[in-house]
Image (cartoon, rainbow, N blue to C red):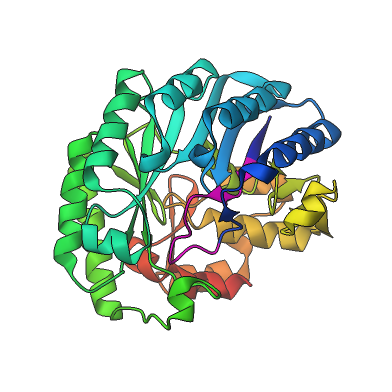
Amino acid sequence: MKAVYIHIPFCNNICSYCDFCKMYYNPNIISNYLYNLEKEIKTRYQNEIISSLYIGGGTPSSLSYAELERLLNITKIFKVSNDLEFTIEVNPESLSLDKIKLLKEYGVNRVSIGVQSFNDKIIKELNRDHNKDMVFKVVNMLKENNITNINIDLMYGINSDINIIKEDLDNYLKLDIPHLSYYSLIIEDNTIFSINKREYIDEDIDYNMYKYINDTLKKHGYIHYETSNYAKPHYESKHNLVYWNNEEYYGFGLSAVSYLNNYRLTNTKNISKYLKGIYLDNSVYEDVDIQKQNTIILGFRKLEGINLTNYQNRYHENLLDNKIVISLIKEGKLEVSNNYLRISDKYFYISNEILINFI
């Protein structure tokens, strides 16, 4: 079974930190975009059973009701498993009750809400359009329509005030939902923050925020299962675990990436090309050394780490014989637990310094 990612690049506004492939909502090109999306899927999809379907962006909920229904109709092309996880990304201000009922009708069973903060000042800095009341209203509407597998995205490190983090977490916990993606601010090139020469907060403050988030969520029964992700038991994102386990997936739409038969395929970011039916931009074959490197780097994003038996079966070698691994275990930076090789807890915050050894 494989996973599918579908990219919808349209947004009602552009956030200060965002470097994803996106553009302002334009009803004049959406019909053509959806036409080409359907054409690409029908051309490339090989009728495998799909275990996870994820519609991201951009902001998929920025589509009108009719556009959203057309998009959801396109997903009927896929053969899906009985336990399909079907996720869509939304923003609070663009998800109405009629759209929620439409999502439910088409089998969407997981919704990821872009929030980033409940604090009005931070929301304004991020150039977002919602407020706290909108978030609570949308979550309640989803629950009332029996969509309870809900994630929200939050962000820390935007400024040095840890009290904002405490307030955001308090509000998150009041929502009573099973999944949280909590990202530390990264200032990417060509974003509004980068253009305005935004600076990072002090590293010690960032670490204190990270630790407070971890400790608070753990106390409330959440599992910190990946670098930036927390879930109640059995609510881990199946789709994202496909990426972190370096398994195969399709990517359809502008800028989407696929990993199929050891090829990393990247679609064009040029909307004009995509609308002309020129979908693929780059195709790179990954030899076994690159495959192993990616499996290690992605696998160490998970707190449980890399399953040693699965790694041996996949690559016919014992990861514990790797010289870099042996050295890092001696240094206490890696450890073996329950047949998994993982980054030790005390080093997880600086995991990038460990991963660089494998590049």
Number of numbered discs overlaid on the protein picture: 0
Q: Nearer the viewer, residue 78 or 8?
A: 8
Say if 358 sits above or below 153 in the image.
below
User: What stretch of residues is rendered in magenta?
Assistant: 6-19
Q: Is residue 300 visible?
A: yes
Quarter of the image for the C terminus: give it.
Answer: bottom right
Residue 121 placed where, x, y %?
23, 63
Q: Is residue 246 left or right of residue 238?
A: right
Q: Residue at x 23, y 46 (%)?
A: 132
Q: Quadrant of residue 272?
A: bottom right
Q: Main secondary structure of the magenta part?
A: loop
Q: Is residue 171 left or right of residue 57?
A: left
Q: Is residue 313 visible?
A: no
Q: Residue at x 44, y 19 (%)?
A: 101
Say if 337 sits above or below 284 in the image.
above
Q: Residue at x 62, y 42 (%)?
A: 27
Residue 54 placed where, x, y %?
57, 37
Q: Nearer the viewer, residue 315 or 265?
A: 265
Residue 33 placed where, x, y %?
72, 42
Residue 163 placed where, x, y %?
14, 63
Quarter of the image for the N terminus: give it.
Answer: top right
Asked whether 258 falls inside the magenta stretch, the response is no
Q: Residue at x 46, y 72 (%)?
A: 192
Q: Is residue 274 left or right of residue 300?
A: right
Say if 135 sits above or below 169 in the image.
above
Q: Is residue 41 left or right of residue 99?
A: right
